[in-house]
Amino acid sequence: MKKNIRWAIVFLLFIATGLSFLDRQVLSIAILKIQEEFHITDVQYGMVNTSFLISYAIMFTLGGWLIDRVGGKIGLALSVGVWSVANSLHAVMTSFTQLLTYRFFLGMGEGGCFPGAAWTVYRWFDKKERALANGIAIGGSAIGAVVAPPLTIWLSANYGWRGGFLIPGLVGIAWVVIWLLIPWKKTDMAVEEPISTTKQDTVPFLTLLQKRPTWVFILIRFLLDPVFYFMMFWIPKYLSSVRGVSFEEIGNLFWIPFLALGISNVIGGWFSGKLIAGGFSINKARKTVMGIAALLTLAAPAIEWVSSVGVAVGLMAVFMFAHGFWITNYITAISDMFGQKATSTVVGLSGTAGAVSGLLLNPLMGVVIEQYSYRPLWVASGLLYPLAFALLIWLIPRIKPLFEEGQVRLIQEDISTRIP
């Protein structure tokens, strides 16, 4: 029974992360109809996207902090519930101001998704299965990105563009109901510390900021998230303007790298778990898979030089496959080090760093492309993961738990004695 429940929970996490990416991408297709109906300019559309990114960046940290205190069950229910209601409200929008507002609340809800998923996986799975479970949970986001364009077009054709927002939003609300109905018993969980909202059961925020691994994980995400955003936002334009691929053909090609990402999320987690089962330490297993990922990303610069569109898309798929290996074990390494009491907060902090970095550097990418070419960005994409891996090896010599049982309470008591 225990095994069935925990894999059912992972499946629901897969659905949640899939809905997260699906819901945020619906607008990129529906905006074509919305602009015609409401005369929204490209500048206003840019403001709408910025509204989402600002709340998403803020809530990645605040959502993670909250989930470490109330637990994954309540925290994820709130997160998915907020963004699903916000997504549904897009279906009744009648003005630019409403779109801006609903987009802000969508980002606010989605900010808690990945910290909550990481916390829940840590709670239900031991070190041998944790990476696989994380890979399945995170893999939903890639599948959501694959499904979003054709599903949105189909829903819009049959139910109008408003249906493209309303139906996924209602699915998300149904998800919340199912999620809350699943019984969570302490004896069924891999980590059996009691869930409590008292301060003694969480690591103080300032204590986390005093730990070097916290800043290393933040730095790595700050370096690498813009590369992922580049792949998400600029591939269609690159294929069109540089490769001369038609709009219809882009739709036939764009999903391939993201399918590779979804597959590698699962394989990367499974491989890491296999290495641990075969005698590798947690440190060696996680870093081995992340090292392989860093090597694979070196294929990215070749995208600029190959003549075949098919080969170029294949290399993009290799890159995204490598990213799946990387991100699954990166998030799992955070949970390995920070445990139940701080995993969600640190995942949230790193996610905020990545979102802020993407927000700052995306305009710069446009300048580089306009004044030079895509070549510097492909080269940077291939070099940043090996750089991040070198920093990980250097600054975190060993991935191991930072807080042993009972240590959090001692930290909190020590802090309280120093407050007059």
Image (cartoon, grey):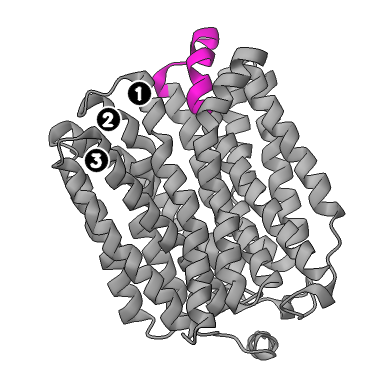
Q: Are marks 2 and 1 in contact (CB under 8 Å)?
A: yes
Q: Are marks 1 and 3 in contact (CB under 8 Å)?
A: no
Instruction: First in sequence, mark 3 or 2: give its number.
Output: 2
Q: Is residue 410 visible?
A: no
- Tell me if 66 is positioned left or right of 244 in this view: right
Q: Which residue is mark 3?
A: 311
Q: Nearer the viewer, mark 2 or mark 1?
A: 1
Instruction: First in sequence, mark 1 or 3: give its number.
Output: 1
Specify the amino acid type for callout 3: Val
Q: Which residue is mark 2?
A: 239
* Residue in the image at 37% along x and 85% along y: 397
Question: Which class describes the residues within 10 Å of circle 1: few (<14), some (14-19), or many (20+)?
Answer: few
* Residue in the image at 66% along x and 47% along y: 16
Specify the amino acid type for callout 1: Glu
In the rendered image, residue 120, in percent from the top left (x then y), is placed at 68, 64
Q: Is residue 420 above or below residue 21?
A: below
Disc number for residue 400: none
Q: Which residues are magenta?
A: 27-43
Disc 1 to disc 3, C-alpha distance: 15 Å
Specify the amino acid type for callout 2: Leu
Question: Along the line of sight, which residue is nearer the eye, 74 or 293?
Answer: 293
Instruction: First in sequence, mark 2 or 1: give its number.
Output: 2
Question: Which class describes the residues within 10 Å of circle 3: few (<14), some (14-19), or many (20+)?
Answer: few
